[in-house]
């Protein structure tokens, strides 16, 4: 097999070497970051790029960043003009290479004897970037200016020197400046480690071989992805689903996709999806791309190294000004929390029609973002708790959907009940599976979770950014839909009141919010379900 | 002469170390997969029969046990019930709500150890201040227990929220349940009185569900040993790297899950210490995988966020990172045209192609083709290797597809395997804030010493150690490990409101618990050592750092603790802030007694088995062609005398590859030291 100047051995050796750089950058970023969101929940990723901005290796611990950073590097290259050693460009503007404002991306050039030989970049989700709500995840913003500080691609380090003026500007606009500073420094440290390691690879392998190696690694992933696409059935496969609403204007937000394989190219066309909306569930193109790459990667061969080559054969058609390719100043914070999940749902739905044996019932299709804030009566200090909650996984050919788990674009950990109650004036009353919430099927959908949080001795403000409260997760091949989720306010007298899918509620002392997350859609005809599984579900009170 | 015996079980062999004043003897006996106790007793029979072990001289036996691990991985635990606070029976199943593989749409959750119908809720609630908010409903609990009577459970675990602050409800529940059910009742406040309910529940359930399994195995060992005239003074290796008594091991099976690997790392530490090396990266490369661990400043790096499979165990364990690269790892060409090595392995059966049992091309075959292994010197007692089969497999499986010669292909296989291991070791060290260049590489296991020099050069490490007991290092680690116990108590309180006297009382209580356990194991008061530490974090952080807690004159010095935390935080994370509020989360104490055997005379009586071998030999290191070097048996490498690569040294159970440019020598104990120079261009 011919691969230009790089043989099969060097290809694999350099692939490991480049991936090791990304791995090490990410390990260093996680280790030195200040906030739990990065060092505990690992909401970050790191990557290596060739001088043209093609991503050659990526280390990521949650899929929401998959394949999105090339947009940031492209924006940095366009904005920065001439790079110099020691420069680090930062960007978070979704309309200039970012995803949503809390995700800040750092991009640093790598030089050898005065010539640009590579870029490295890292991205991290910051716990606050200003805007109208603590945590910068307001569920009722109607334009990006309410969502926090927008940073276009600008140098935060110039020739190795920190640009203090810019740093002061950033820190003045966020609620927790010291923590931000710690996380920004950790991102810079990650980039510096990446630069040093890439310089090491230049000395070890030489510039020529490294450049050829990057090309070969891209070509390798591209080859493998094209081979996967060639095996897909011909034809156009369409699927439609919807978000419940944007929290501002009543009405579902349809997302439509048409997928067709042409030769060894895959065209993913979102034409016909809703126009961008008032509320904060608009996705910029980078977010739509991440969700698309996730779904295709999961449905084909997840072992293909994730790099730009892997995505070359995939063409995304997303009309400008639509909910999957929003233009400024649309609010976008929920785009890569909620809309990204629905984009995955429609692509897996369409691919399930193309490859019925690999069809999967819809997973819960939401991250159930819950932020609780108030003043802790024990200390007089303000607090903010941010959580996401797992739910039902879709039924598959292999098995029932998993009960009570995060799916698709997120995989972040819960906060332990004991840790939560120790740190905040809140009490968790239940944390359990919701009986009967899985969609029926030969392999049923997974169960949702019920999590009930009570305010203790103070008034708490809860903001909700959730979905699948009215439109249920679909089943496949005759499987039933999963149960929709429910947000319920429990008054102190035990009375139940509905709480919104997106928006805010106030909890008086002793009142609680109960979040029931959606179940997964079922797979296959429920009549075909084995007696053994039916009996187990009954015995274990799962149905 | 008094003897101490170390017995470790592997997939193929039972490794035995017999330590006495005169030194250490080693033996390998075949293991009996599926019936581990039988393998151990048969090995003892043979060694007693041969006069190597003299039962009346034996002062102690230490054992690395894989029974708990295997039972967990194979799902062979006892039917167990779990009693929880109302509203929380699914904590064990939901876990941390994350999934193990991000992109596998077909992935399933590992079986939950207690099925949902055996997870029962009872009305009770303690709040985060440790106050009873809802008293335990004893009548309800009795009804649950009655219902459980017909359920045929062999053990019960009880986990209530905040029981580490107030264990009374769990204890009252035990009284009710034990009385009515007559099976072991295991409390989370006994197993792990620490914050974080999921990890505590998992650890408690593992201890309960494995108790019957481990109990039967250990009883068989003790009984079988006694029948052979051996003392009942068995010690079992724990995941922490310290050994404990049978009774204690049986009580806490969750502490045995890394019993095997912990022995190896403990052995490596002892060898390193004897050679004056305090910073070691240990690399134990066998047939299917390579275990990497770090020893920093003489101490084994441990973790409390480990586990086995997807079952977390929040007890201290040696931090071992496993890489899917071993001698049996299969070489293949993937659909994208890249040469890949692993993760599939030929294991021991059929084994590599050169075993002549129909295996495919592996890393071991590549070594044989290149002259790194010598065909007529079988591996660890195996018959001679089939060089033709190795060449044929490498050519057919890989070489022809790539259009490369057998030798070039073999070099490529090793290059790829090394690149993968380099990547893994780099990440492991960076994650912990370490630089591999500050370490010495200690290579052991069947394949470790073949890769030690090349991996070291890739990582910029100058020195490689190959211990004399490379093939039985785990068994050696058993006899040199201290007896030890880790006890803990979560407190969770901010520094500004902390009462030094109260903290001191908690530490005293932990010390009393540790001392009582050691006393029960026959350790004298003057041999006991106690090391207190504390988990501290800044308010708002999710993770704590464990820092030493000085208790001079039984006074707890909180200011010193706070300073130690700042220093540790800067060292680990690169920043710290004395002005920021911090909180104490958990107090810890390690109580330890002396090892069964004190190292130092390790090699004095090492058996020198096999014929002295020393002849010219062609060895490939790069595509330019073979280099004329030598092959020697390990017994012919004269102590103290230096040697140079290219050289292949054939040991009893592992082969050492010394590349050109590397120099080596054997020390007085027979450990080999290779100076490999620096290959890494450096990154600073």
Image: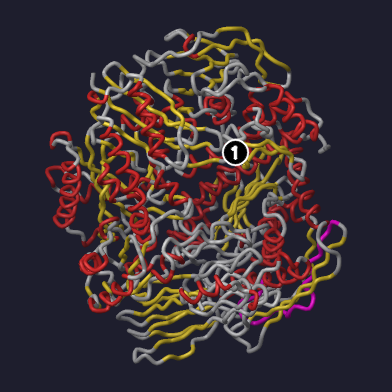
Q: Helix, strand, or loop for circle 1?
A: helix
Above or below, B235 against A79 in this view is above
Residue A201, placed above or below residue B659: below
Q: Position of residue B641 (x, y in %)?
A: 45, 7
Q: Residue at x 49, y 79 (%)?
A: A435
Residue at left 39%, top 33%?
B8
Q: Give the left or right position of residue A96, taking residue B479 as reference.
A: right
Quarter of the image for the N terminus of chain A: give it: top right
Assess whether residue A229 is covered by the magenta stretch: no
- Residue name at image x 44 percent, y 53 percent: B76
| Residue B589 % position (x, y) | 24, 47
Q: Position of residue B505 (x, y in %)?
A: 14, 54
Q: Percent from the top left, x then y, of residue B179?
A: 21, 66
**Image: magenta residue range:** A264-283
Q: Is residue A37 visible?
A: yes
Q: Which residue is denoted by mark 1 in the rendering?
A: A197
């Amino acid at each position: 097999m011919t691969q230009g100047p790089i043989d099969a051995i060097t290809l694999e050796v350099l692939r490991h070497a480049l991936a090791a750089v990304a791995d090490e950058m990410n390990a260093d970023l996680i280790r030195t970051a200040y906030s739990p969101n990065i060092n505990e929940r690992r909401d970050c990723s790191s990557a290596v790029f060739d001088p043209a901005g093609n991503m050659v290796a990526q280390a990521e611990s949650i899929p929401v960043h998959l394949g999105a950073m090339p947009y940031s590097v492209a924006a940095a290259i366009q904005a920065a003009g001439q790079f110099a050693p020691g420069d680090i460009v930062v960007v978070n503007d979704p309309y200039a290479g970012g995803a949503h404002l809390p995700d800040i991306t750092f991009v640093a050039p790598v030089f050898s004897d005065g010539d640009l030989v590579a870029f490295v970049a890292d991205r991290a989700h910051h716990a606050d970037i200003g805007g109208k709500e603590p945590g910068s995840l307001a569920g009722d913003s109607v334009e990006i200016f309410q969502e926090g500080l927008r940073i276009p691609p600008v140098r935060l380090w110039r020739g190795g020197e920190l640009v203090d003026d810019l740093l002061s500007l950033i820190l003045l606009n966020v609620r927790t400046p010291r923590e931000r500073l710690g996380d920004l420094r950790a991102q810079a440290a990650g980039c510096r480690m990446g630069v040093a390691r890439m310089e090491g690879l230049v000395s070890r392998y030489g510039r020529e071989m490294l450049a050829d190696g990057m090309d070969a690694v891209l070509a390798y992933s591209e080859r493998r992805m094209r081979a996967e696409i060639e095996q897909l059935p011909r034809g156009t496969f369409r699927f439609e689903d919807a978000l419940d609403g944007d929290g501002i204007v009543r009405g579902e937000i349809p997302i439509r996709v048409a997928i067709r394989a042409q030769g060894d190219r895959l065209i993913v066309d979102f034409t016909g999806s809703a126009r961008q909306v008032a509320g904060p569930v608009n996705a910029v193109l980078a977010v739509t791309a991440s969700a698309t790459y996730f779904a295709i990667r999961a449905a084909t061969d997840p072992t293909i190294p994730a790099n730009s080559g892997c995505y070359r054969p995939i063409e995304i058609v997303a009309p400008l000004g639509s909910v999957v390719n929003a233009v400024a100043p649309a609010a976008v914070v929920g785009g890569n929390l909620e809309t990204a999940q629905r984009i995955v749902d429609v692509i897996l739905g369409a691919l399930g029609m193309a490859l019925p044996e690999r069809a999967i019932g819809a997973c819960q299709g939401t991250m159930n973002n819950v932020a609780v804030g108030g003043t802790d009566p024990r200390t007089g200090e303000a607090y903010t708790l941010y959580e996401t909650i797992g739910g039902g996984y879709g039924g598959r050919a292999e098995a029932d959907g998993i009960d009570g788990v995060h799916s698709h674009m997120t995989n972040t950990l819960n906060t332990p009940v004991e840790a939560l109650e120790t740190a905040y004036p809140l009490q968790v009353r239940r944390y359990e599976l919701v009986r009967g919430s899985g969609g029926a099927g030969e392999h049923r959908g997974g169960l949702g979770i019920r999590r009930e949080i009570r305010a203790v001795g103070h008034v708490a403000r809860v903001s909700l950014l959730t979905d699948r409260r009215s439109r249920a997760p679909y089943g496949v091949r005759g499987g039933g839909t999963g149960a929709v989720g429910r947000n319920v306010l429990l008054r102190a007298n035990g009375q139940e009141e509905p709480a919104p899918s997106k928006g805010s509620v106030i909890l008086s002392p002793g009142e609680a919010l109960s979040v029931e997350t959606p179940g997964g859609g079922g797979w296959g005809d429920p009549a075909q379900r084995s007696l053994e599984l039916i009996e187990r579900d009954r015995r274990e009170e799962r149905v | 002469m008094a003897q101490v015996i170390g017995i470790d079980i592997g997939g193929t062999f039972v490794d035995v170390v017999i330590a006495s004043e005169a030194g250490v003897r080693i033996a390998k006996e075949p293991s009996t997969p599926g019936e581990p106790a039988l393998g151990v007793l048969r090995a003892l029979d043979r060694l007693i029969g041969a006069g190597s072990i003299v039962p009346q001289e034996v002062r102690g036996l230490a054992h690395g046990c894989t029974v708990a691990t295997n039972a967990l991985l194979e799902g062979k635990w006892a039917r167990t019930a779990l009693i929880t606070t109302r509203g929380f029976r699914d904590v064990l199943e939901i876990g941390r709500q994350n999934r193990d593989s991000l992109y596998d749409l077909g992935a399933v959750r590992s079986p939950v150890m207690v099925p949902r119908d055996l997870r029962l809720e009872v009305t009770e609630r303690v709040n985060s201040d440790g106050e009873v908010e809802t008293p335990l409903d004893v009548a309800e609990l009795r009804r649950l227990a009655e219902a459980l009577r017909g359920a045929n459970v062999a053990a019960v675990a009880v986990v209530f929220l905040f029981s580490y602050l107030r264990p009374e409800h769990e204890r009252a529940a035990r009284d009710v349940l034990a009385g009515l059910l007559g099976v072991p009742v295991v409390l989370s406040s006994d197993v792990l009185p620490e914050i974080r309910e999921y990890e505590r529940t998992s650890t408690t359930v593992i201890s309960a569900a494995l108790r019957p399994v481990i109990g039967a195995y250990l009883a068989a060992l003790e009984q079988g040993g006694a029948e052979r005239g051996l003392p009942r003074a068995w010690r079992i290796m724990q995941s922490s790297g310290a050994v404990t008594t049978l009774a204690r091991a049986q009580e806490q099976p969750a502490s045995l899950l890394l019993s095997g690997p912990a022995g190896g790392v403990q052995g490596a530490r002892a060898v390193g210490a004897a050679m004056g090396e305090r910073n070691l990266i240990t690399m134990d490369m066998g047939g299917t995988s390579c275990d990497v661990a770090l020893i920093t400043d003489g101490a084994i790096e441990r973790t409390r966020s480990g586990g086995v499979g997807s079952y977390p165990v929040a007890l201290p364990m040696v931090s071992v990172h496993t890489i899917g690269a071993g001698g049996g790892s299969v070489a293949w060409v993937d659909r994208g045209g890249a040469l890949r090595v692993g993760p599939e392995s030929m294991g021991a059966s059929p084994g590599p192609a050169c075993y002549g049992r129909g295996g495919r091309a592996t890393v071991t075959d590549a070594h044989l083709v290149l002259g790194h292994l010598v065909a007529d010197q079988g591996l660890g007692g195996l018959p001679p290797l089939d060089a033709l089969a190795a060449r044929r497999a490498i050519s057919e499986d890989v070489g022809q597809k790539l259009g490369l010669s057998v030798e070039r292909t073999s070099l490529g296989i090793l290059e790829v395997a090394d690149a993968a291991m380099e990547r893994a070791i780099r990440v492991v060290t960076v994650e912990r804030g370490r630089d591999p260049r500050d370490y010495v590489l200690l290579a052991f296991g069947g394949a470790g010493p073949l890769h030690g020099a090349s991996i070291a050069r890739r990582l910029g490490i100058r020195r490689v150690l190959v211990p004399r007991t490379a093939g039985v290092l785990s068994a050696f680690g058993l006899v040199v490990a201290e007896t030890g116990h880790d006890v803990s108590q979560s407190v969770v309180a901010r520094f500004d409101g902390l009462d030094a006297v109260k903290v001191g009382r908690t530490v005293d209580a932990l010390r009393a618990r540790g001392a009582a356990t050691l006393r029960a194991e026959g350790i004298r008061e003057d041999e006991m050592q106690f090391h207190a530490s504390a988990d501290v974090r800044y308010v708002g952080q999710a993770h704590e750092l464990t820092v030493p807690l000085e208790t001079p004159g039984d006074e707890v010095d909180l200011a010193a603790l706070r300073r130690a935390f700042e220093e540790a935080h800067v060292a680990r994370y690169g920043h710290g802030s004395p002005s920021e509020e911090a909180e104490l989360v958990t107090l810890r104490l390690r109580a330890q007694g002396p090892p069964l055997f004190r190292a130092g005379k390790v090699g004095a009586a090492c058996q020198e088995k096999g014929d002295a071998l020393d002849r010219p030999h062609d060895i490939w290191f790069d595509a330019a062609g073979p280099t004329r070097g030598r092959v020697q048996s390990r017994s012919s490498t004269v102590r103290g005398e230096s040697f140079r690569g290219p050289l292949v040294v054939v040991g009893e159970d592992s082969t050492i590859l010394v590349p050109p440019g590397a120099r080596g020598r054997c020390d007085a104990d027979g450990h080999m030291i290779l100076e490999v120079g620096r290959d890494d261009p450096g990154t600073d």
